[in-house]
Structure formats: structure tokens, C-alpha cells
Amino acid sequence: MDISLILQMVLVAGIASVLYTLIGVAPGTDETAVLAPVTLVLVLAGFEPVIILTFFMAAIVAKKLTDSIPVAVAGIPGGVMSAPMVEHALVLKKHGLADTSIRKMASGSVIGTIVSIPISFALANVLSEFSEVIKEYTDPIFFFGAIFLALMTKNKWLALVSILPLALLIQGLRHLYWGVGIVPEDTTVFISFFLGITIGPVILTLFELLNGDLRSKLTRHDTKKISFKISKKIKGFPNPFRILTKNETVSSFFSSILGVGTFFLSPVGMTIMIGEVVASKIKDPVKKAARAISSMDALTNAAYISGTLIPLIALGIPLSPTAIGPGHALFNAPPVFTQDHNLHHILSMSEFFWATIIGAGIAILITYFVTVKYAVQICRFVFKRIPHEAMLGLFFGLVLLLAYMDAGWLNVAGVLLIGLVAGVLNRLGVNYGVQFMTLYAAPFIVNTLF
């Protein structure tokens, strides 16, 4: 690895850190919706694989560090993974400790990052011994993975029943494309279907706005007023081990280990569980909330990092919710990456290591420093100057462009159809994990049954 490549890695890590620091602060920016399309564009643009991984790792760490800010300041989730923390953050906000909440969550994220990286590499090395056996059963694994994730949701029966219809829709569109000749029969449209599922809730909401009756029933709000508390400044570079108490540090450490060990499970479900467990015996509401949010943020960071690195290094197939969602383009982005030729096959262990260290390290240096010291100023700028709808519109336009590049205008309609179905399922309680697993398993399900 020459010096010019290292400098490029540092540069893209810096760009990702700044970009996703701003995106993370914006309320409601789902991790998959803002990470997957950008990563895919970098892959299709022909960037070096090690550069792409560096960008992705920096983006994940930066996004997870900053999505705690709108939770602490306004009680609004910065993303799906920060939603379980709202209740605890509001307790601290009620006691005038929003700045403390930000610092505790950000410090938990840093500990989760530091703990998860070495353990993820160690666990990946162990699992790599069984990679060939696992790969032989890839299709059934995806199918049973969809069933397993469905059973992990609140609406188990609905999620289970939705698997077959969604698989039929996906394979039906593919056979339609082959039948009319818009794509060759040896080409499988995948990326645009994946992105259609990703922004399904956005597509559904946009279609609902075209319905006059539904639009008239929407609640109208005045301009939102959000108050900011002037926080006490921290001198020098913030130290997470000083910001967290000893008990909070210990619980964050063990939460991080749990996040790595359960990389194949739903990060949201594990986050909710750990928040209840670590603080269940604490009576003081402030101490209870602080312990919960620091541990939960540590687990989410650890789950995202391990959920990307372990399948990527050990297997080369996306066998975790993170790999299937935000990290999907690292595994499968035809024609650049396929399941038989992706980062797993291209990068050496040392390249994986340095891409992770540089990406995560730069993100911590930039984003953690900025988050802890200038959280309120960033929030004020983003809330006032960067409309949430503008960012979602940008990603929506990008998805339509990639759909057209995949298979022309007919595929744009197909992606809108998949997005509508995915959006309805998402609203009914069928999460992204079940839908993405079904996307992978669709050929196996249809070929087996018919």
C-alpha cells in the first residue's frame, strides 16, 4: 500500500466524516437510505475497493456519532437506530441535561467502535474456516434468514406471510423484463429493486400526497420552535472515559461485545433489549437514562461495524441486517461487484485492517470532537438551513436514475411498484431485514415452489 493510496484513504475518510456528520444531525435520515445509494455510486464510479471501504467505515462511524444530537436536543430520532433512545434522552432533556445526553451517547459510540474492531477481525478469522461450507447453502440460508428475522419482529405472522408474495413480485418483474427483452436473460436486475425497498416508505408517502382525501387529513403544524441550552464548553480533545462514569464505561464495553456477538440479529431489537437490561435496577431517573443511552449507542456502533466486517471478511455474502442494508453495495453491485467477486475476494486482510482503522479513526477525530464540542451549533445550522425533505428528494432522484440505468423506463415503474409494496409492508411492521432477505432468496423460493 503506497503513500498516495493512504493519502486518498485519509481524504475520503475526511469527506465521509464531514458529509455524514451533517446528514446524521438531520432528523429521520434512515441509515440504509443515506448510506446504500452513495456507496453504490462510488462502486459504480470505479473507485478503488479499499477507498470505498474506507469511505463506508468513516460514514458509519460519523453517522452513528451524530444521529444522537437531534434525539438529545429535540427528542427526534436521527435515524432508525436512534429511535429506541428517545425515551431516555427526553428524561435527560427534562432535567436540563441535553448536552450531557449528547456527550454520553457519543462517548458510548466511541467505545463501541474501539471494542468492536479487534473482536470483529478475530471472529471473522474464526468463521472463515467454515466459509466454504456456509457458501454451499447460501440460498437456503437467505430463505431461513428471512423466516428467522420475521420471527424476531413484533408482527411475526404478517412478516412470515409477506415473504412469498414479495418473492413472487420480485421474480415476476424479472421474468417480465426477460420476456420483453429489455435485459438479457443472463442479467438479473437487483440493485434498483434493493433501492426500491430502501426508499419504500418515501415512495408510499409521496403517492399518498397525490390522494386529495388523505392529504386533507394530514395534520398541519406551525413553524416548530426548538430551544437550545447553552452547554458548558470542554477544553481540549474530549475523553470518552472521563465523560462516562466507571459503571457506564463497563456497561458500554460489555454491550459492545454483545453487539459483535449478535451481528446477525436485528440491531434495533438488541438495542431495545440492552437499554432495558443495563438500567433496570437503577432507581435514579437521570443515572438510569445516562447508563441506558451510553450502552445502547455502544451496541449500535458495534453491531453496525461487526455486521459489515464479519460477513465481508469471513464469507463474502451479506449475512447480517447491516450487510444486507447499508453495506449491500460492498457485496453485490453488478457489474462491478457480484457474490463471486466483491471486497471479500479483492482485498487482503491488511487492506481490510487499514481501511477500517483509517476510516473509523478519522471519523472519531473529526466527528466525535465536533459532536461533543459543537453539537448545538451544528443542530441549529442543520435544522434551519438543510431541509430534511431536500435530502430525501436527492436520494429519491438518485434511485430513479439508477433504476433507469438498470433496465430503462419500464424498470422505473417496476421500482415504484416494489417501493409501494415495501412501504406498505414497512408501515405494517415488516422490517427491512425481512424484505432484503426475501430479495436475496426470491429465486430460490420461486424455483423451489414452482
Image (cartoon, rainbow, N blue to C red):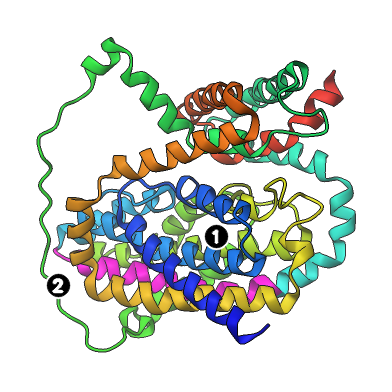
Q: Helix, strand or loop at disc 2?
A: loop
What type is the residue that disc 2 sits on? Ser
* x and y percentages locating residue 407 in the rendered image: 65, 29
Q: Is residue 106 magenta?
A: yes
The mark found on residue 51 in the picture is none
What type is the residue that disc 1 sits on? Tyr
What residue is pinned by disc 1?
Answer: 304
What residue is pinned by disc 2?
Answer: 231
Residue 78 visible in this rendered orientation of the protein = yes
Q: Helix, strand or loop at disc 1?
A: helix
* Quadrant (top left/top right/bottom left/bottom right) for the N terminus: bottom right
The answer to which quarter of the image holds residue 284 is bottom left
* x and y percentages locating residue 141 in the rendered image: 78, 43
Q: Nearer the viewer, residue 430 or 367?
A: 367
Count neighbours of disc 1 (C-alpha within 10 A) and say few if under 14, some if 14 to 19, many if 20 or more. many
Q: Give me the C-alpha separation between circle 1 and circle 2.
A: 30 Å
Residues in magenta?
96-121
Q: Is residue 98 left or right of residue 352?
A: left
The answer to which quarter of the image holds residue 162 is top right
* x and y percentages locating residue 111 in the rendered image: 46, 75
Q: Main secondary structure of the magenta part?
A: helix
| Residue at horizontal 59 percent and vertical 63 percent from the top | 52
Q: Is residue 76 left or right of residue 108?
A: left
Q: Nearer the viewer, residue 303 or 375?
A: 375
Mark found first going from the N terminus, 1 or 2: 2
| Residue at horizontal 53 percent and vertical 66 percent from the top | 55
